[in-house]
């Protein structure tokens, strides 16, 4: 009854990684909290510290880019993992590297790094590392069929 | 089936703008950092802690100033002038005990607690200071130009000068005259000041006296105030033919072509004719004339009569000259007599001269309201009636701050309309008619700036349609607008404006009116603008509520104790019945 082009996964065998899905879920909520807090932190730094306007605009714009990358990465990761498809999961793996670069930037290179920001970006880097490892293992499991 | 994306709320993109400039924030460390600019205080450099964040650049505490305001000696080192290049010091603070104000650039540090900051990549230099409380502060040095230069210089021109003076200036009183120098009045023996309007020169009244054996004339001998003296001196002429018409001592005009100052303080305003007394010539005086071998009309005697009035000074000066003829010959001589006589002035207008002030400078309530007409100051007056109600020649004096009303009946004579109007107007506002009112109680009649013109509002003639009617005023209302100025602790009352408001009625020409009732009243209107009073903190006004359930029951139980004792018994009975019914079921 199905079109001949599509190929269903064998019934009874689930290759999706549950720990990876848990990490994606937690990372999604954590990212929402992270961005809201970052907006307030930028407000705090802009008011209290002598923030150059160009630096402030750059940091906020990069924060919005970071938000876009994270949303795409988490969506494709979840999609690939639950559908047991290699291409979305590969896209998610590829986007993990710019995401980690963004987190490193906010940890080390932005104009003023607060201690709270250092902790939060450290947690984000932990999420990126863990998800990268699990995604690679999941891709290997998908390829084994 | 694949699930949707995480349902977390995506934060809205917000364009962050810095609300305030960083330099406006004040912190204790900033006071510590800017302390070197205070002169006299020994500079305590805050303890420098190694910055925990790498990449912080060392702060340049002494940048080179473009203009060194304390470099007063070129080529030499000025002590404590930290921006002086002549000192050849890379670190002037190691040598000088303090820096003079203006010799270092004003620093602006923005500080937050160091525990908040992880690291800094700011383009501004930053360092960690130890606060006075021992708290480590992360400070960022901002080169704020607002601290080093005045902002937005104001351009002053003819149009906005008045606005700026009104905005930044304050109220001022009309000050009294300077009494230090020159003295305010002549004393006995003082030289008498004269003024030559032709050359605008102030000089002294001379009384030449004889000196030496021959009694030659000494021209520079001044005449003394209240010193009636008589002096004689001799003049010798080498060439009388030329001295006859050129020597001013022989010319009669040189003895009366000046004015005498009433009081010495008139020197400050010599152009004012009010303080000058012209010299009145009381005898015949002719110009010297050389006729053949005779020099005619030579002054041989000068007599000055000066009338004085105590501290009011000289009131009247008159001169009489005696003239003679001289024969032109070698060795001609002339003996001249100079007589000065002082006489007390007859006080014909003592009332106006001895009129006291109504305040200094502001008016005092109850003092007369000063009016002015033709340089004569007097008190504003109202009508006053006699015993039988008719108008009296005497008038009631207007007192400052005291509203008054008075009326009388004026007996009219048979006259035409214009004469009738004129007579009634003169009766209402008094004779002479007031033109100005003193702004302050110490106004001087000679200073027109201290007086304000009275606004007159006469009857409107267009409202009357009668052709053979005479419009006569029947009442005069003097409206005085006044206000306090100056300090709240020392308010001074001044008059802002005065208006004469007349009420009129028309009478028929055929109607024979023998007398008319006149009314005069004065109204003082206070237009003082008071400043905003200081506002206190609002106080809480709360109390326990006593009008709802627990308080209501507790309060009303004591009143209705007799009635309420039955209720619990009834309730208990009902409960028992309910229990019995349940057990029965």
Image (cartoon, rainbow, N blue to C red):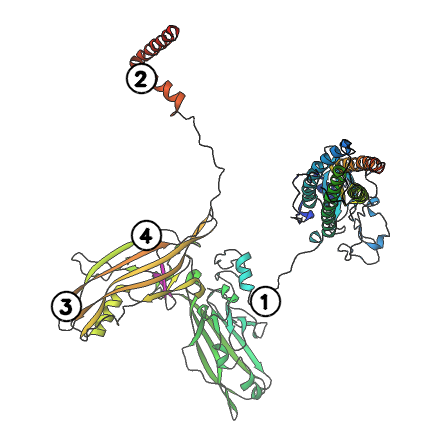
Distance of mark 3 from mark 4, alpha carbons? 34 Å
| Residue B231 shown in magenta | no
Q: Of callouts 3 and 1, which one flags the residue occurring earlier in the amino acid sequence?
A: 1
Q: Give the residues drawn in magenta, as a range.
A: B363-380
Structural crowding at the residue carrying mark 3, measured as other residues with C-alpha within 10 Å and reported as few (<14), some (14–19) or many (≥20)? few
Co-location on one chain, circles 3 and 2: yes
Q: Earlier in the sequence, mark 2 or mark 1?
A: 1
Foreground label between 3 and 1? 1
- Name the residue carrying label 2: B559
- For disc 4, the chain is B
Residue at image x 83%, y 41%? B54
Q: CA distance from mark 1 to mark 4?
A: 45 Å
Q: Is residue B385 above or below residue B245?
A: above
Say whether residue B34 is left or right of residue B352. right
Out of B23 and A29, give the one closest to the viewer: A29
Place residue B527 in its image quadrant: bottom left
Q: CA distance from mark 3 to mark 2?
A: 83 Å
**CB contact under 8 Å: marks 1 and 4:** no
To the question of a shared chain for discs 3 and 4, the answer is yes
Provide the residue designation for mark 3: B513
Mark on residue B157?
A: 1
Mark 3–mark 1 Cα distance, whole angstroms, equals: 64 Å
Disc 2: which chain? B
Secondary structure under the numbered disc 4 in the rendered image: loop
């Amino acid at each position: 009854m199905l079109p001949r082009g599509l190929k269903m996964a064998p019934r009874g065998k689930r290759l999706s990684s549950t720990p990876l899905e848990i990490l994606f879920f937690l990372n999604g909520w954590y990212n929402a909290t992270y961005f809201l807090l970052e907006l307030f932190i930028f407000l705090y730094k802009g008011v209290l510290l002598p923030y150059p306007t160009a630096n402030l605009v750059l940091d906020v714009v990069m924060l919005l880019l970071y938000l876009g990358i994270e949303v795409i990465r988490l969506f494709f990761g979840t999609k690939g993992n639950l559908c047991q498809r290699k291409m979305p999961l590969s896209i998610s793996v590829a986007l993990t590297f710019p995401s980690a670069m963004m987190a490193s930037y906010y940890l080390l290179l932005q104009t003023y790094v607060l201690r709270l920001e250092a902790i939060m970006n450290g947690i984000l880097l932990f999420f990126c590392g863990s998800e990268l490892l699990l995604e690679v293992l999941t891709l290997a499991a998908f390829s084994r069929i | 089936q694949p699930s949707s994306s995480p349902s977390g709320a995506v934060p809205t993109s917000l364009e962050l703008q810095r609300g305030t400039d960083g330099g406006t924030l004040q912190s204790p460390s900033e006071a510590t950092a800017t302390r070197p600019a205070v002169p006299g205080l020994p500079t305590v450099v805050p303890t420098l802690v190694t910055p925990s964040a790498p990449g912080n650049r060392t702060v340049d505490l002494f940048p080179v100033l473009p203009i060194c305001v304390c470099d007063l000696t070129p080529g030499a080192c000025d002590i404590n002038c930290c921006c002086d290049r002549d000192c050849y010091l890379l670190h002037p603070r190691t040598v000088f005990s303090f820096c003079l104000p203006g010799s270092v650039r004003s620093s602006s540090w923005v500080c937050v607690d160091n525990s908040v900051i992880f690291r800094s990549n700011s383009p501004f230099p930053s360092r960690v200071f130890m606060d006075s409380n021992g708290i480590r502060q992360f400070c960022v040095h901002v080169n704020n130009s607002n601290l080093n230069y005045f902002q937005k210089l104001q351009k002053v021109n003819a149009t906005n000068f008045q606005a700026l003076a009104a905005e930044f200036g304050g109220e001022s009183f009309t000050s009294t005259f300077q009494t230090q120098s020159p003295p305010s009045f002549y004393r006995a023996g003082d030289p008498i000041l004269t003024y030559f309007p032709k050359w605008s020169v102030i000089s002294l009244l001379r009384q030449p006296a004889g000196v030496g054996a021959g009694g030659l004339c000494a021209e520079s001998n001044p005449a003394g105030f209240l010193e009636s003296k008589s002096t004689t001196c001799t003049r010798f002429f080498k060439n009388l033919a030329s001295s006859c018409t050129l020597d001013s001592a022989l010319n009669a005009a040189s003895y009366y072509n000046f004015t005498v100052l009433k009081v010495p303080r008139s020197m400050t305003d010599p152009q004012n004719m009010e303080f000058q007394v012209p010299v009145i010539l009381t005898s015949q005086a002719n110009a010297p004339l050389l006729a053949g071998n005779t020099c005619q009309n030579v002054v041989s005697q000068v007599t000055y009569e000066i009338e004085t009035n105590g501290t009011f000074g000289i009131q009247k000066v008159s001169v009489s000259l005696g003239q003679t003829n001289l024969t032109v010959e070698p060795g001609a001589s002339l003996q001249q007599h100079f007589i000065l006589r002082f006489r007390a002035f007859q006080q014909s207008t003592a009332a106006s001269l001895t009129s006291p002030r109504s305040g200094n400078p502001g008016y005092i309530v109850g003092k007369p309201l000063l009016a002015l007409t033709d340089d004569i100051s007097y008190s504003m007056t109202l009508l006053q009636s006699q015993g039988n109600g008719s108008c009296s020649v005497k008038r009631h004096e207007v007192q400052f701050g005291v509203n008054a009303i008075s009326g009388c009946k004026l007996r009219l004579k048979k006259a035409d309309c214009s004469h009738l109007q004129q007579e009634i107007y003169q009766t209402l506002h008094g004779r002479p008619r007031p033109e100005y009112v003193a702004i302050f109680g110490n106004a001087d009649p000679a200073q027109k700036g201290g007086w304000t013109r009275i606004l007159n509002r006469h009857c409107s003639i267009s409202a009357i349609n009668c052709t053979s009617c005479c419009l006569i005023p029947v009442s005069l209302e003097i409206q005085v607008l006044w206000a306090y100025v100056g300090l709240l602790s020392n308010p001074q009352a001044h008059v802002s404006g005065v208006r004469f408001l007349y009420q009129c009625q028309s009478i028929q020409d055929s109607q024979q009116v023998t007398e008319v009732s006149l009314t005069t009243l004065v109204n003082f209107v206070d237009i003082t603008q008071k400043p905003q009073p200081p506002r206190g903190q609002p106080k809480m006004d709360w109390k326990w509520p006593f009008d709802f359930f627990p308080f209501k029951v507790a309060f009303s139980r004591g009143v209705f104790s007799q009635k309420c004792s039955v209720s619990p018994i009834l309730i208990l009975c009902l409960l028992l019945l309910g229990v019995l019914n349940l057990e029965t079921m």
